[in-house]
Amino acid sequence: MIDRRFFLKSSGLALVSGALVPNVFVKMANASTTKGRKVLVAIFQRGAVDGLNVVVPYAEQAYYAARPSIAVPRDRVVDLDGFFGFHPSLQSLAPYFKDKSLAVVHAVGSPDASRSHFDAQDFMECGTPGVKSTDDGFLSRAVMADKNAATPLRAVSFTSSLPRILSGPANAVNMTDISRFGVRGPESPAFAAMYGGAFEAVKILKSADPAKLQPENGAAYANNPLANSLKQIAQLIKSNVGLEVAFTDVSGWDTHAGEGGAEGQLANNLRNFSEAIAVFIRDLGSRMSDVVLVTMSEFGRTVHENGNRGTDHGHANVMLSAGGGVKGGKVYGTWPGLAENRLYENRDLAVTTDFRDIFAELIAKQLSVASMKSVFPNYEPKWRGVMA
Amino acid sequence: MKRLLALTSALLLLSASSDRLTERQRAQHALDRLGFGARPGDVERVMQVGVDKWVDQQLHPERIGDRAVDSRLAQYETLTMSSHQIFEQFEKPIIERRQAKKNNEERMEIPREQRPQRLVMELSAQRLIRATESERQLNEVMADFWMNHFNVFAPKGLDRVFVTEYERDVIRPRMWGRFEDLLMATAKSPAMLFYLDNARSRSGAINENYAREIMELHTLGVDGGYTQKDVTELARVFTGWSIARPKEGDGFKFRPFVHDRGAKSVLGVRFAAGGGIEEGERMIHFLAHHPSTAHHIAYKLCQRLIADEPPPSAVDRVAKTFLATNGDLRLTVKAVIDSPEFWDPKYYRAKVKSPFEYTVSAIRAVGGQLDDPIPVARQLQQMGEGLYLSQPPTGYSDTAKAWNNSGGLMARLNFAVALVENKMPGVHSNVTALVPQDRDALDTLALKLTGGELSAETRKTIAERNPSVEAMAGLILGSPEFQRQ
């Protein structure tokens, strides 16, 4: 049986032991080690981010043939492994790939063929592609399956409503601003009596006061929704309020027109995205040994650009994962290639890794969940080795 | 005496038989579902007119006077502007400023009232004032419904210029006519053409976005029976459906030179080569009358008006009416309200209010005055329902799942508390005036604010606080019972 302590010894600490500390993790003299729980942070890029322009298969001629105006030029790509390279906007994450704390999974996605944003997001968040009757989210089920006692702030979503992925019995709370999570005025106890649960979280936040924590290690968050969410997730992690799963999402990826290549719409969004994550990792410093961050999107986009220098809805996509225990510095997944006869339905990158395989590993390690039966019903995850 | 009154009202509640709503409950239900909740005295007024008669009046909003609202809205000048005027006043200065910056010329800051943010603010103000003050309550419920069904995201580029005309001239005038006319008007609206990229879709360089969403969201529904091939073919049909440039007179323009003139086949409808605009018009007609569309529209209307999981019997009946009347929206909505399911006690207070419904019903319930809607519009953003700000084409959801979350709850509770303390900017009310001297405050407020539907448990929680009248009202407006309708 896999349990947390095993991984602390063999993986998490590797990140902080002397010789392997990358200079991007600045150790503060008074940084305390994280007490308590490991954390999984998931970021959903809603709208189907164009994975082929995020992690570019620059060594494939077919990529350039398919995207005459929006391909990222070879000399603009940040090389990862001689075949793939980051979009230049992901510059700030490149050091983490190089120091092996960040991994990439490509050609990953859902077996379901839907190209409807809303269906595909639902299927992904429920963890049961193709099944519409699932009411709850797989992260909620994962939290329920972990061995820790329930605490009010173990599952938090930084969104203005509760996303499907965290809907369910785990009683996740959602907020966009920690300091505003609560009711002003003297009648708060009455509302607590009426509503219970959420107010337990309010009490804990009041006494822990995470909002007072400043970013560390020279981290400076930009002023955009994702950075704001990650900043606050970091505050929750540092204040030891019992957080296990954090979620946030970011929109603006549905680039049907004017997507741009090395520069442009997607490039700008990716820059904010990349920098927010890089700053988060920097802020947490040595605490990252207990944290794994992962990105996801409902599907990818067409290999070929469309008539408006954009891309339409596709199939397979890319996921990034960074943190303690991640065996980074590698692009995982079997690359199907972009030859016409290897495309899904003659238009999209084919899926060769089910997204549930990746999440199963992350959930097993971070939440010490022994069996994925309840998390991903009717599915046997395959071990991909992204986590140590 | 007070205790006797309390007991009496409690008994009145209990005496409602479980298989029929009382007349008072029917009035409350009508005001809640077909409007934005009761103002003080509304339930009595509706009972006096007769619930069925009131419903019939609401189904003909054109016969209900709205002058008071019109004069309230006169101060929001952008509401009556054309897209062209809006472009000249709000978009052009930005373009000129950008150009000037490139040429390294100095330019003054654009004054606040000329910034495009004003457009969405005034539109939001309009919606809030109408929902709070108009007697055409069902009309406002339907405006909210259709603006979500045919959602447009104002902050997307030029959509902020187009959306004023979109709501005023495309959606609102067609809500009670035929669905096909409404659908056609949205298909040809600059707002939709821009939002879902069809304006840029050209022969040999098609953009699928609109073709997919018109089938998935606007008509057939995601399981309505279309394939990826149909999406691509329909996108070809709509090539050339574009937006006229300012010189060309604004509005819709069909561009024959970018229209794909090849042969096509969509959902079994075949087009020989050489076609033009009539292909898209034919497909709109086809989609508007498709049985899947009837079912999809019926489902959404029943979800909105009856229950999150609408009873299939009602949906089927309403879908039949839609088809039989050629998509007559007035008769279709009437079919929902006429259905026994609409008045079934099982669905009484079974829905959770959206943030928009919540804030407006709270203001109405306390007889509040909406002096300046803009701060309330900002609150709606906090609650997760910023008007005109839904980025995905689905618009805002109409089910409890979307709104039953802790973050939104906190925002609502803070709103309720601020409202009753007169600390909500832009709104003022006099809660104390709601309770006559000799009456029990809790009983009176429970009756006036929730139609007497406050549970014993909530009453107990409130009574234990020994609150002032304001605090009591705040607690009731924040109670789980007031979140429902």
Image (cartoon, coloured by chain):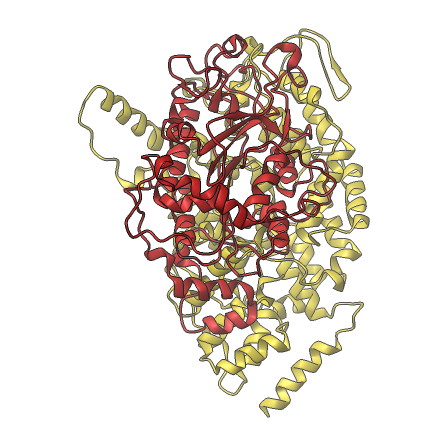
Front residue of this view, candidates A262 and B279:
A262
Could you tell me which residue is drawn at 79 percent across and 42 percent down? B321
Residue B428 seen? no
Residue B177, given in percent of the width and then of the height, sits at 66, 39
Front residue of this view, candidates B321 and B14:
B14
Q: Is residue B2 above or below residue B341?
A: below
Q: Colour of chain B?
A: yellow
Residue B59, given in percent of the width and then of the height, sits at 66, 51
Q: Is residue B78 left or right of residue B64?
A: left
Residue A368, given in percent of the width and then of the height, sits at 58, 49
Where on the picture, by quarter, is residue B198? top right
Residue B214 seen? yes
> If the image is split into quadrants, where does the N terminus of chain B sit?
bottom right
> If the image is split into quadrants, where does the C terminus of chain B sit?
bottom right
Q: Is residue B26 left or right of residue B323?
A: left
Q: Is residue B15 above or below residue B40?
A: below
Residue A101, given in percent of the width and then of the height, sits at 44, 34
Could you tell me which residue is drawn at 78 percent across and 34 percent down? B291
Q: Colour of chain A?
A: red
Please identify the residue farthest to the left as the structure is shown.
Answer: B106
Q: Is residue B90 left or right of residue B72?
A: left
